[in-house]
Image: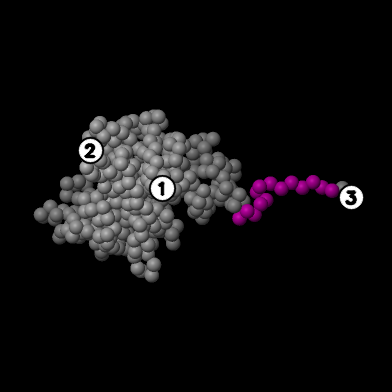
Amino acid sequence: MAIQNSTTSFDDIPEETASNILLRLPVKALIRSTSVNKKWYSLITNPLFISAQVKNATSHCDDNAALIIPPYLSQDKYCSLISAGTSKLIKKYEVPFTTKSDTLKLVGSVNGLMLLTDSTMRYNSRDLYLWNPLTKTHRTLVSTCFKNVLSNPYTSYGVVGLGFNSSANDFRIVRIVYAADKNVNFFGEVAPRVEVYSLRKHTWKKIKDAVVPGLASNEGTYVNGSFYWKDIANSQEENDLWIMSFDFENEVFGELKVPRNVSNCMGATAKLWLMGFEGSLALCVFDAHQINGVASFPYHLWLMRQENDLISWTSRFSAARKEGGGWPLNITKAGTLILEVCPLWGRLDVKSIVSFNPMNMHLKDLGFSKHGAVETSILGPDSEFTVDTSFTESLVMYEGGKALVKFAK
């Protein structure tokens, strides 16, 4: 009896098995795969597949990489992904949009999706830009529920944060709008307004009767479902550090007071930054001073822990350099601080980006000039670099199309 040959194609594989195989591919290969047939396109663009891809990519991303965002688009239109350990350039991504002031600032990054804005006060938090560098897709958000209020930059002020609502499998943006009262007080008689943007629905909605603890700064970070900001209003009034949060799952604000032994561990004049590290909210305390003519740059990192509604702070590390210190911008998953410094303290016209390993005290110049970036004047306004240390390959906001397939080839 003759034996008939049988052939099995990839399409004969059960969908769950096919999905597990495709999840192992890099983003560019996945984008190319969407052009194979309608079945693959439907599978790869499915929100559940994208969520699984993000989770898989996050667990395999480079723990010591930093994506450096330039402050001036007029000088440099590229973001540089650099290894903080070797200073080697991993990849460069061209910014596909322009801002009204030609300045750029990172608000936050979640699972490969970045939220950026102008760094100038006139446009900051008003015009927003969602961008996934891997898929080369972006959205410019100029709409708002409070157009009349936000249209005047002299009588209104905005604070924004990016997060993720896991129950809805949706990325969200929260924006708090403060309007000045008759005494030009931004946190006086006029109650703050709050709106939330849904990436999935591409719409803003008002949060009615939102209880906003105080005026937050525009510096913050996203950790475990919430975005956190330093609370300027309370901190200035009581000489204590307060932190305001927004829970994207329940869409409510919270507030916590940081113990003085944490925020003032280096004195009341030390500078404070919020970061995400080891799955916790981190507070980086930095000071710069001279003792008997010798410069010192101490850094202290605290982690916030929360168990059974009880909050505690744990010292993660304390390190100091006698030279080459600078402002901390962020910390990589591997524990390397990314700093912005003056290459020569006698020369105050340029900045550079360096990495600082607090365990071995090594300082490494990330070589911006070597990678084709432009040195930036520190004398001009709004010249700060911003850094994403959680960057990962992601299909978030992938919208298909021949242009993206061509890009992936």
Number of the front mark, 3 or 2: 2
Q: Which residue is mark 1?
A: 359
The alpha-carbon separation of the residues under discs 1 and 3 comes to: 72 Å
- Kind of residue indicated by mark 2: Pro
Q: Position of residue 151 (x, y in %)?
A: 21, 47
Q: Which residue is mark 3?
A: 1
Farthest residue, direction left? 183
- Kind of residue indicated by mark 1: Met
The 10 Å Cα crowd at callout 3, few under 14, some 14 to 19, many 20 or more, is few
For the point 25% across and 64% down, which residue is it? 211
The alpha-carbon separation of the residues under discs 3 and 2 comes to: 85 Å
Considering the numbered disc 2 on the image, is that residue within a helix, a strand or a loop? loop
The span picked out in magenta is 3-17
Q: Are marks 3 and 2 in contact (CB under 8 Å)?
A: no
Q: Position of residue 217 (x, y in %)?
A: 25, 52
For the point 17% across and 58% down, which residue is it? 237
The numbered mark, 1 or 3, whose residue comes first in the sequence reads 3
Residue 358 in magenta? no
For the point 67% across and 51% down, which residue is it? 12
- In the depicted view, which residue is nearer to us: 229 or 320? 320
For residue 381, which numbered disc appears in the image?
2
Number of the front mark, 1 or 3: 1
The alpha-carbon separation of the residues under discs 1 and 2 comes to: 34 Å
The numbered mark, 3 or 2, whose residue comes first in the sequence reads 3
- Kind of residue indicated by mark 3: Met
For the point 34% across and 65% down, which residue is it? 311
